[in-house]
Amino acid sequence: MDNEIQKVTHVQNIRYDRQAEALYIIDQTLLPNEEREICLQTAEEMYDAIKALKVRGAPAIGICAGYCMYVLAKSVRTEDQQVFLRKLGEYGEYLNSSRPTAVNLSWAIRSMLRTAVENVGCTRGQMLDALYEKAVSIHRDDIDKCTKISEFGLTLIKDGDGILTHCNAGPLATSRYGTALGPILLGTERGMKFKVFSDETRPLLQGARLTSYELQRAGVDVTLICDNMASMVMKNGWVQACFVGCDRVAANGDTANKIGTSGVAILAKHYGIPFYVLGPTSTVDMDCPAGDDIKIELRDPEEIKTMWYEKPMALPEVQCYNPAFDVTDHSLIAGIVTEEGVIRPPYDKNLKKLFARKG
Amino acid sequence: MDNEIQKVTHVQNIRYDRQAEALYIIDQTLLPNEEREICLQTAEEMYDAIKALKVRGAPAIGICAGYCMYVLAKSVRTEDQQVFLRKLGEYGEYLNSSRPTAVNLSWAIRSMLRTAVENVGCTRGQMLDALYEKAVSIHRDDIDKCTKISEFGLTLIKDGDGILTHCNAGPLATSRYGTALGPILLGTERGMKFKVFSDETRPLLQGARLTSYELQRAGVDVTLICDNMASMVMKNGWVQACFVGCDRVAANGDTANKIGTSGVAILAKHYGIPFYVLGPTSTVDMDCPAGDDIKIELRDPEEIKTMWYEKPMALPEVQCYNPAFDVTDHSLIAGIVTEEGVIRPPYDKNLKKLFARKG
């Protein structure tokens, strides 16, 4: 199973080396200048990796969290299973606090904890094997979901289309094809040509550092633009569809994604361009009625003022507002592309139907 | 007259020192870390200063160009006035090619050339005096216009309002109060309080480096945001008006301004916030029927990929699209604030009326 995961992944962003008993991730904050793997051993290293966006993208965070919980489970040296469960629960709570907006994080942690509870009464070895299998299955499921999302997304565009994307929802953010970039990468494999516009995505520049990197490496015609150029690119008639990922989708279709996504959606509506959200159904939070209920993480002002730059780009005393995400109103979204198909409005009704069917 | 100019200017971005016979500008590319004056002596230095945005903002470029033409006129050592006029015309053409979109540049150069033609037959000393007086009058007129624009703009907002601005149209871009920042600075002098959101304005970060610098220095409550955060700030209900400058206004009200301006206008319309363009009537080009006729300058991709950064932020081979300006459709503009008053739609009719009245 491990081999299969390795084989099909475009960029191996997360890998658990069973021989070395070690979890490795590509430190995405160093891309595109350096492709360096780091080993996550302690809960603090894991918390930091998620918080500092060394691993990022909702699905990738989920995959990483699964392996993290397995590594932490191995580190709990006790025969008392109540102590083991309590300690694992504490680790889960700690990791979960690193990125409050990422529903995949809490989802993966809960899945691992459920597996642990289900295996109470087994030997320590059996417990750890079950947790390892669960982590691998989270990873494998994501590859499967990304492939399906890519197939469904590909039905929405045609050869020669221009596609605008914001932030990064490619292989680095997920597994294999990614979500928002999935249809593009899959179509390119099949000989189709697209012209992709990648918003650089301030302040952390995921579009410049990651998306344009992934697409360029995959041989896709990609053009990097500043976020504020999207309006002009659309006005020029160069964009036939917008594809973005998602960090959390509320039950009514409101979607939290990287800051700036809602602006892209409003521009797309203005110019009559369909705006699609791509993500696995695990990103849909049916317990969250609407976007207003999504807690938005505020990040360090220095990300805007000094990070990346040789010299400060503003007076040190200037205040900044630095939300990590914004919420795109469901009325701006033409479709939500999941592994179960393309969900269309009305989202409240159609998401409820989908989850009723899934059970 | 020189003293009056010096006295009323918030930041002395351009000054001609008559004793030293030298033209000085603040190199705006070094702000906010360093406030350094540079001396412009040759046509090449002047071309470079305008091209490289050491002096920037349509009115400031016009003011600078006036003094530049005077300095260049002084450098032409001939008693043959036809040779003098031809040489000055060549200098004008050369300077004019440094920023094709800035109508104030060609306007100021034409004004200086007209003054030269009007003084054919005078002594060399009289000719140079006339050109100096013309350059000073361009400067003085801008101060006068900015003050009037600030007064008219102030009628559009009230104490406590939140105002979003894009790029820089403050004292550094103009003279004295500036245009887009004028009402804010004037109102602040009168004890009013505003909460200003300054888009950082990628790729050259004029909002971070210049606008937030000017406002912070003036004691205004300013919050710096990335361009892609404007949608969220508006959605939060924090913005009651948008104020932007302009590089060229077409006869139908379509407005060329810093890239990203059209996106702000579309967001403002979506959220029901009035979007105002502030600039002197010299920025209105009645010979340009509509925005489609405005030539948009494309700039170096490295401004997006490597400028400011310690390390490249994208693979070197990634292509970029880097337009310096975009055009905001007149339908998105609630009013154009000039020294003659606030022009309201329909712009084609009302701008024609204004210019007929001005003669």
Image (cartoon, coloured by chain):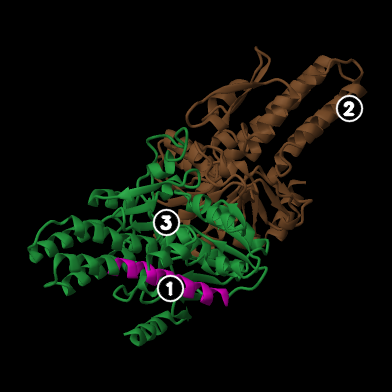
Chain colours: A green, B brown
Residue A95 is inside the magenta segment:
no
B228 vs B18, nearest the viewer: B228
How would you classify the magenta stretch by its main secondary structure?
helix
Disc 1 from disc 3: Cα separation = 17 Å
B43 vs B172, nearest the viewer: B43
Q: Amino acid at mark 2?
A: Arg
Q: Secondary structure at mark 1?
A: helix
Residue A313 image position (x, y, % from top left): 47, 37
Q: Secondary structure at mark 2?
A: helix
Which residues, given as a range, are shown in magenta? A134-155
Left or right side of A18 for A236? right
Disc 3 from disc 2: Cα separation = 65 Å
- Residue assigned mark 3: A13
Q: Quadrant of the N terminus of chain A?
A: bottom left
Q: Earlier in the sequence, mark 1 or mark 3?
A: 3
Which chain's residue wears label 3? Answer: A
Left or right side of B173 for A137? left
Which chain's residue wears label 1? Answer: A
- Residue assigned mark 2: B86
- 3 vs 2, front mark: 3
Residue A150 is inside the magenta segment:
yes
Q: Amino acid at mark 3?
A: Asn
Above or below A73: residue B15: above
Q: Quadrant of the C terminus of chain A?
A: bottom left
What residue appears at the point 31 percent right and 53 percent down from the top-left corner? A20
What residue appears at the point 83 percent right and 18 percent down from the top-left corner? B76
Give neighbour class at mark 1: few <14, some 14-19, many 20+ (Cα, 10 Å): many
What residue appears at the point 70 percent right and 42 percent down from the top-left corner? B102
- Residue assigned mark 1: A145
